[in-house]
Image (spheres, rainbow, N blue to C red):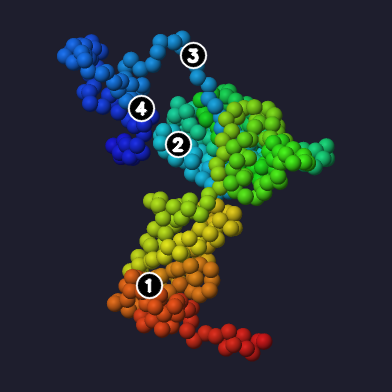
Amino acid sequence: EGNADSISQLNISQYGRAGSSIPGEPFSSNASEQSKDKTAAATTTPTAKQTPPSDINNISKPDFGRAVEDCELDKSNIVIIGPTGSGKTLLVKTLAKLIDVPLVIADATCLTQAGYVGEDVESILLKLYIESGQDIERCQKGIVYIDETDKIRKSGGNVSISRDVSGEGVQHALLKIVEGNVINVPKEPGRKNPRGDFLQIDTSNILFICGGAFAGLEKIINRRMDSASIGFGAQMKKNTDDHKVQGKYFDNAIPKDLVHYGMIPEFVGRFPVIVSTKGLDEDNLIDILTQPKNSLLKQYKYLFAMNDVDFHISECGLREIAKTAFGRGTGARGLRAITENVLMETMFVVPDIPEVHTVYMDAEAIRGDRKPILLTDPGVTIEKFEELKKDSNGCIDSIDGAEVVVIDKGFTEEQDFGEAA
């Protein structure tokens, strides 16, 4: 029931799957009764304009679709390219949760060619088998997400000196698994035993999704699309470091670009769908900070609430966090690094000051001009503090009941390091 409720909250009725019948009509398993009702409705109002129902192509109807020759549907493996912190892994996790299939996220950097130290590619299928509850049928309909795929590209050095066992060798080992075959997977991880027990897993219906940042791919696409030219109609040089320009180039990626990047043609050919995620701008980063159920700000509110303290961040503070993370180019992952650096001392100080009721953080605290502010007077609310701060031109020392975070009030740099200097 809980799974049904969570799926119903996703508002997927637009895809023709949520409803069991056409809106406004009770569902009846007897097709003859439905036809009689429709005929009667048509005869009673012959002059009324007939409008087709909105979800006439609902797949829950018994007469859905046209009568065509049966055939087997092949899967379409996907390559997701995009800058770091743009939501590639979260996208796959949400997809697996929506359609209720087992998902395993594998790291391509720890895979090696068979016979060398490292994980074999068959270990991915063993993890999927364990994730599916050791149900072989459910396992064969799961999703495998191979992260950091761009790290297994061909080595640019002289391959005649040593074999590229963690790069091109991994691509060769993945070919048969990705394409769809019956693979013998050892039940016990580690060194293969020819006399050991094996699981036979058919990968024909397992969806493989490869993701990676593919740093530098935009320059390859730029050379292909914007060839060098001179004159009045020449193409102006574009800044590939701009996330908007980078996103447009990623949208125009073709398999040839991935081959030039270092992926072998046989591997790229088994991934017919290439999609891209765009870099996050400041507004997106602010939404990530505040909107999700387990957003970063809600986590900090929960941590401070354990000490019976409220946590508030101003609008300018949110904008400053997003601006800093955007400038660093680390995407959504960079948000926690910024907030942890600002609130580290505050989280240690607050438990030792029982009169604190609110922690206030604004843009000045994010920039490092001063520490966050602790409100100790019960009569000083957030609204009143912001008014007093505005009246005092940002001077916190003149506001009673508000103080800046200090690790030790009696500590000074001269007292601690004076003799040593």
- Judge depth for marks 4 and 2 and give the one in front: 4
Between marks 4 and 2, how big is the CA–CA gap?
19 Å
Residue at numbered disc 2: 96
CB within 8 Å, label 4 to label 2: no
Please state, as top left, top right, bottom left or bottom right, where the N terminus lies in the image: top left
Residue at coordinates 42% horizontally, 63% vertically from top-left?
315
Residue at numbered disc 3: 71
Residue at coordinates 48% horizontally, 53% vertically from top-left?
283
Between marks 1 and 2, how big is the CA–CA gap?
45 Å
Residue at numbered disc 4: 16
Residue type, numbered disc 4: Gly
Residue at numbered disc 1: 386
Label 1 sits on a secondary structure element that is helix
Residue type, numbered disc 1: Glu
Label 4 sits on a secondary structure element that is loop
Whichever of labels 2 and 3 marks the residue nearer the N terminus, that label is 3
Please state, as top left, top right, bottom left or bottom right, where the C terminus lies in the image: bottom right
Between marks 2 and 3, how big is the CA–CA gap?
25 Å
